[in-house]
Image (spheres, coloured by chain):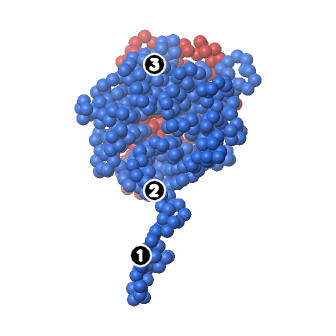
Amino acid sequence: MAGAGGGNDIQWCFSQVKGAVDDDVAEADIISTVEFNHSGELLATGDKGGRVVIFQQEQENKIQSHSRGEYNVYSTFQSHEPEFDYLKSLEIEEKINKIRWLPQKNAAQFLLSTNDKTIKLWKISERDKRPEGYNLKEEDGRYRDPTTVTTLRVPVFRPMDLMVEASPRRIFANAHTYHINSISINSDYETYLSADDLRINLWHLEITDRSFNIVDIKPANMEELTEVITAAEFHPNSCNTFVYSSSKGTIRLCDMRASALCDRHSKLFEEPEDPSNRSFFSEIISSISDVKFSHSGRYMMTRDYLSVKIWDLNMENRPVETYQVHEYLRSKLCSLYENDCIFDKFECCWNGSDSVVMTGSYNNFFRMFDRNTKRDITLEASRENNKPRTVLKPRKVCASGKRKKDEISVDSLDFNKKILHTAWHPKENIIAVATTNNLYIFQDKGN
Amino acid sequence: MLSKGLKRKREEEEKEALAVDSWWLDQGHPAAAQTPPPVASSSLFDLSVLKLHHSLRQSEPDLRHLVLVVNTLRRIQASMVPATALPPVPIQPTVPTVADSLLSSSDAGLSASVASLLEDLSHIEDLNQAPQLQADEGPPGRSVGGAPPNLGALDLLGPATSCLLEDGLEGLFEDIDTSMYDSELWAPASEGLKPSPENGPAKDETPELDEAELDYLMDVLVGTQALERPPGPGR
C-alpha cells in the first residue's frame, strides 16, 4: 500500500473535496449514502435533507494523462420530502438511506433512492437540443394567432446548453412498517429487494402497487423480539440468491426458489464467539452494519463494530479472513456505549478486482486491507492534505504506552468525526469517502 | 478518558446527569478490560435503563438500538442476580442495592414490562410511543422501578402503562406541552442546542413526572375527554 514504494503499491492522493468548509454542520447536509454507478462515471450522494447530488467524471484529458478526470456536479434534486403520517402521528424522515444505480440501458440513467419508508426510481436524462421553428408557437412558448400564420415550416432541432433533468418514474410506497435499511437490485435487472428491521420485500421495477414479502422475522409476540435485520443484498450473479445480516452477527443466505417466504435460510453464517473477548457488549459489537458481495460473487464481506470479515459462501462456520479496523477501541467499549458510538453503522466496500477492501473509522480515518499482501493502511480525510497529487500520509493510532511522533493516541480521537460511507470506483483506483458533510475523492497517483 | 476530543452529541445531553463509575474508564490494560466483572456495576445497569427510556421515548424508536439495549440489559441483569436466572428467586441480601430499590419501589398502576409495552405498541403495527408519560420513582438518578418479582421479562420500566395507551388517548399525549412538568433533573444541559427537527418540541425534552403529577395528568385527561388536539406537529 501507499508509502512502501514498489511497483504494485497504490499511492493514494487527494483529488477533490465537495461540501461546505465551515465546521458548523447543517443537519440537512449530513451525507448519508455514497454510490458509484456501474461505469464509475457517475457518483451519487444522498443526504439527511433528502437531496441527491450526482457528480460526473470529466472526460479524460489526454494531455494530462497523469490523473483521471475530476468529478463535477451533474445533477441535484430533491428526492424525498419530509412527510407526516397522520394515521400514526409520526414524522417520516426525508434522509436518504441508500442509493443504488441501475445498469445503463439507454441514454438515460436510472437510480433507486430510499428513505425510511418509500423507494423511488429516478430517471436522469440529458437534454442538449431543442426544437425551434414551431408554426403555432412563438419561441417563448406563447401561442400565435392562427390567422397570422401565412407560411409553414418544419421545426428543426438546434443545440442548447446541456440540461440534466431528474424525474421520478416510480414511487414504491406503503410496503414497510419499519425503517428501510437496504435496497438491492437483482441481477435480472427487473426486480429488487428492500429490507427493513423485520421484513424484506421483493419488487418489480415496473410495478408499484404491490410487492412480495420474502422474509419476515417479526415474532408473533413482539415481546420475543431479540433480533433485527440490519442489511440485505442480492447475489451479483445468481438472481435467486440473496443474503441478509442481523443484529446478532449472523448472515443468512436464502434461495427464492426454495419457497415463497424465505424464512428458512439455505445457509447460516456465524462465527462462534471468542470466549476471551466476552463482555456485556459482545452482542452489540457483533451486530453487522453492512454486508457486500464481492464482484465475483464468491465471497461476501461483513462489517461489525470492530472488524471486517470476509466469508467464503461455501463455508458457514467461520470467515476466511478477518481484519481489525480499530481494535484499540475494545477496551473503551463502555464509554462508547455511554456516548452511543457503539451503535454507529459503518459500511464497507470492495475494489473492482476484489483484492482490497475499505471501511471507515473515527477521527475521519478510513482503512484499507489488501487481501493478497495482507498489508493495511490508515488514511485521513482532511482538508489539511488538500494539495492534489500529494501522496497521503499513513496514520497510526497509538493504543497504549509511549506515543511515537506522528501517532495519535486513542484518547485524542474525535468520535464525532466518523466515516460511515465509502465507495470504490468499479474499475479504477478512485475512492469516494464521506465525512459528516464533505465528500472526499482520492485517486491513485499512478493513474 | 474520551474527554479531550469528544464533543457531546446533541441528543445525549441528558446523560450528563449520570455518573459513571470511574473504574470503568480506566481500562488501560487490555487484559483487564476483556474480563467483565462478575457483577455489573450498577451504573452500567442504570445507563442501560436510561438508554432504554430514551429509545422508547422517540416517536419512532430505532428498533435495532432498542433490541440491542434490551438484550444488553438482560445480560447485565442476569449477572446481577446471582446463581439462578429468572424466573425469580427471592432476592438475596447480597444483591446490589439497585435491584432492591427497583423491586421495592412499585406501583401496580404504573408498572409495566418492556415486553408488554412492545406488545401493545405492536398492535398498532408501529412503535408509536407516548413520550411524555414517564414516572421517576426512587432517588434521582435512579431509573424507574416498579418491577414485579418476575425478572424474566425485564420488568423494569414504570412508564407508559398499557392502560394509559388506549387508542385515542395516546395521541393526545404527544400534543400536550409538558414543559411545565420538566423537573430540574432533566433540564437540558445546554439550552443553546436546538431540538432535532424530526421531533416535536415536547418529545425530546423527556420530562420526568413524579407520581403525583402523573395522577394529576390522568385526572385532567379523564375528566376532560374533549381535549382539543392542536394540528399535527410540523418540522
Residue furthest out toward the bottom: A147
**Neighbour class for label 3 at 10 Å: few (<14), some, many (≥20)?**
few
* Comes first in the chain, label 3 or label 1: 1
Chain A tint as drawn: blue
Disc 2 chain ID: A
Q: Quadrant of the N terminus of chain A?
A: top right
At 37% across and 20% down in the image, what residue appears? A314
Nearer the observer, A68 or A318: A68
* Comes first in the chain, label 1 or label 2: 2
Q: Quadrant of residue A377?
A: top right
Residue indicated by mark 2: A125
- Numbered disc in front, either 3 or 1: 1
Q: Which label was assigned to residue A154?
A: 1
| Marks 3/1: CA–CA distance | 67 Å
Chain B tint as drawn: red
* Residue B84 visible at all: yes
Where is residue B234 shown, x and y percent of the image? 48, 55
**Neighbour class for label 2 at 10 Å: few (<14), some, many (≥20)?**
some
* Comes first in the chain, label 2 or label 3: 2
The amino acid pointed to by label 1 is Val
Secondary structure at badge 1 equals loop
Residue indicated by mark 3: A320
Q: Eyeballing the image, is B208 above or below B172?
A: above
Q: Quadrant of residue B33?
A: top right
